[in-house]
Image (tube, rainbow, N blue to C red):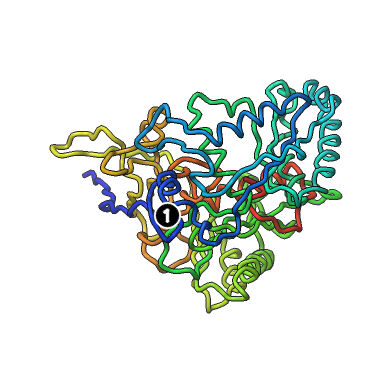
Amino acid sequence: MTTTSRLSAYSQVKEPELVFAGGNKSVNPLLGLKAFGPYSLDLKYLDTIRIASLTPIGGNGKISGVMTELSSTIKPLYAPEYYPDYIGFENIFRTKIVLDSSLNFEFDSEIDVFARSGDICSFKQKFKEVLISINQQKMRFEVLFLYLPDTWHGIFKTPDFDLHNFIKAIAAPLGVPIQIITDKSSGNCRANVMWGISIATYAKAGGIPWKLDVTTNDEAFVGLSYAMNKQSEGSSYITCCSQIFDSAGIGFEFIAYDVTDFTMDENNRNPYLSEQETMNIMSRSLQVYQNTHSGKIPKKITIHKTIPFSSDEINGCRKALGSGIELELIQIQHTDWQGIKIRAAKQADGYPINRGCYIPFKNNECLLWIQGTVDLSGRSVFKEGALTPMPRPVLVKKFLGSNGWHDTCSAILGLTKVDWNNNTLYKSIPITLHYSSLFAQVVRDVPEIIRQKYQYRFFM
């Protein structure tokens, strides 16, 4: 006798709405910006964004060209159901953007030689010197546009050096927001490119393009990632990287701590912290939240990881946060599951499964489609298109928490829509995991930046 196992019926959470100026809402971030202006417009503190530039000798024309396009009207070449016409930075953000000609900085010819030849050590030293000198004038500008030409191919990325991570690690402690411009920024669809540069620049200048529409403002989300494989005087250690967001998806700060009391899994790939180390990290994360909320304690904290929570970590979280804070511990990982959307008469639909669908299949596990079909103004849109014809769900595993799957999945879905270094409808993972992982990569490459707090706009 054979038995057939069956999954539970699926459910679906609504596409999260975003809030813009005047409290207006839209599920499409670009249409929302174009129609209403950014959320922080109501705060009236960012009326002009001053741009400084840093280029190789003779590269100022690249920055000037980008600035001209930022003030232009450009029609999209594809996906008009999502990408509206780009109508110029000032019309979209209701904020002026100005390139200050007195702040056009150039590298000397020596750094060009280092970059082309792949002399990483000399390049790093020269770059750091230049950025430190620019830092002395950072009160005169909001964002530094940095042009990296393709001719620097020898320095872009090697097994031992990631240029992007290095730049962010040097700039963040100086408090200099950087928007990198490369020759790859010259994509075919200029409207798409300008939307991306505009949103990132506005956020790096300190603006808030949009936030999530939420019913509560006293919840915090924490993403945890690890930078591993380091040696200090013969002793192994890891660095735990934490990123804190509020319930509206607005990020506060990164923090990173060296951890020595941990164990590795059987494959020696994933670290698990001791109860005391977990208590230390969560206590500091809570302090970051309180520092931005006049000492107030959130009613609920949700922690996201890509690996399981150990019993010591669960106990450490409980002890650090106390009984007065509701706690939810969630693991989110990619899977090999696939699903087909069925129409009437058991026929496959022409589009993939809807984004936001979820299927519980154990008491503490469910599948969630972060990628999938979205209804935009009555039209079905699947943004990955031919690149991912059949999106796979993520596995969501709950190690602690009493809420139902609908609330848990809705929060995850919302946190895929608040990456402001991005001009698409959503990311494939929540921002909690995306940026804590990015920060961990930077720390792994430049470990000396730990033990400081950083606003996440410096790592966008």
- Looking at the image, residue 89 sits to the left or right of residue 81; the answer is right
Q: Position of residue 251 (x, y in %)?
A: 58, 57
Q: Residues within 10 Å of mark 1 (few under 14, many from 20)?
A: many
Q: Residue at x 46, y 36 (%)?
A: 86
Q: Which residue is mark 1?
A: 18
Residue 341 is drawn in which quadrant? top left
Q: Position of residue 21 (x, y in %)?
A: 46, 57
Q: Quadrant of the C terminus?
A: top right
Query: Camera-side residue: 367 or 440?
Result: 440
- Looking at the image, residue 307 sits to the left or right of residue 166; the answer is left
Type of the residue with mark 1: Leu
Count of residue discs: 1
Q: Residue at x 60, y 65 (%)?
A: 312
Farthest residue, direction left:
345
Q: Quadrant of the N terminus?
A: top left
Query: Camera-side residue: 183 or 71?
Result: 71
* Residue 65 visible somewhere in the drawing: yes
Residue 94 higher or lower than 73, as above or below: below
Q: Residue at x 86, y 25 (%)?
A: 110
* Residue 265 visible somewhere in the drawing: no
Secondary element type, mark 1:
strand
Farthest residue, direction bottom:
324
Q: Position of residue 146 (x, y in %)?
A: 70, 35
- Looking at the image, residue 143 sits to the left or right of residue 346; the answer is right
Q: Residue at x 50, y 67 (%)?
A: 219
- Looking at the image, residue 250 sits to the left or right of residue 342; the answer is right
Query: Camera-side residue: 359 or 325?
Result: 325
Residue 372 is drawn in which quadrant? top left
Q: Position of residue 97 (x, y in %)?
A: 61, 43
